[in-house]
Amino acid sequence: MASTRTNARKQGQRMKQLMRQRQMLRLRQKGEKLIPNEILAKLAALNWPPNEFVYQACLEKLLRGM
């Protein structure tokens, strides 16, 4: 049972990575950005300190709100 669960989790991770690669390829072909300019402008307006954790948290919240 445990090996089945492990294999399923690994397969899920591979599928997630594959979907992410396809999404990036589509965006590159269309010339679009992964993060819209509106979101980047809102992040810049917050004037947070250069902390990666804070940046990631704010970015996730803003992207979820779209």
Image (cartoon, grey):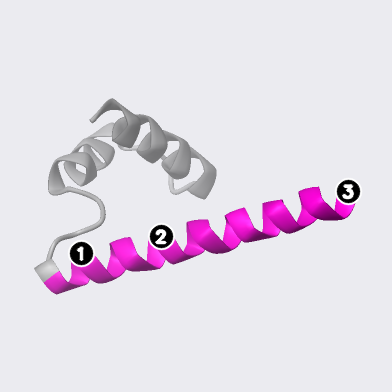
- Residue type for callout 3: Ala
* Magenta stretch encompasses residue 13: yes
Quarter-of-image position of residue 43: top left
| Mark 3–mark 1 CB contact (< 8 Å) | no
- Residue type for callout 1: Leu
Task: Identify the element where label 3 is drawn.
Answer: helix
Where does residue 31 sit, x and y in percent of width and height?
11, 68
**Most common SS among magenta residues:** helix
Identify the residue under disc 1. Answer: 27
Where does residue 40 sit, x and y in percent of width and height?
22, 46
Taking depth in this image into account, of 3 and 25 the one nearest to the observer is 3
Task: Identify the element where label 2 is drawn.
Answer: helix
Outermost residue to the top: 65
CA neighbours of label 2 inside 10 A, class few (<14), some (14 to 19), many (20+): few
Q: Residue at x 14, y 41 (%)?
A: 38
Taking depth in this image into account, of 28 and 47 the one nearest to the observer is 28
Task: Identify the element where label 1 is drawn.
Answer: helix
Identify the residue under disc 2. Answer: 19
Q: Which mark is residue 48?
A: none
Distance between the alpha carbons at the discs numbered 3 and 1: 38 Å
- Residue type for callout 2: Met
Q: Residue at x 18, y 48 (%)?
A: 36
* Magenta stretch encompasses residue 38: no
Identify the residue under disc 3. Answer: 2
The magenta stretch spans which residues? 1-29
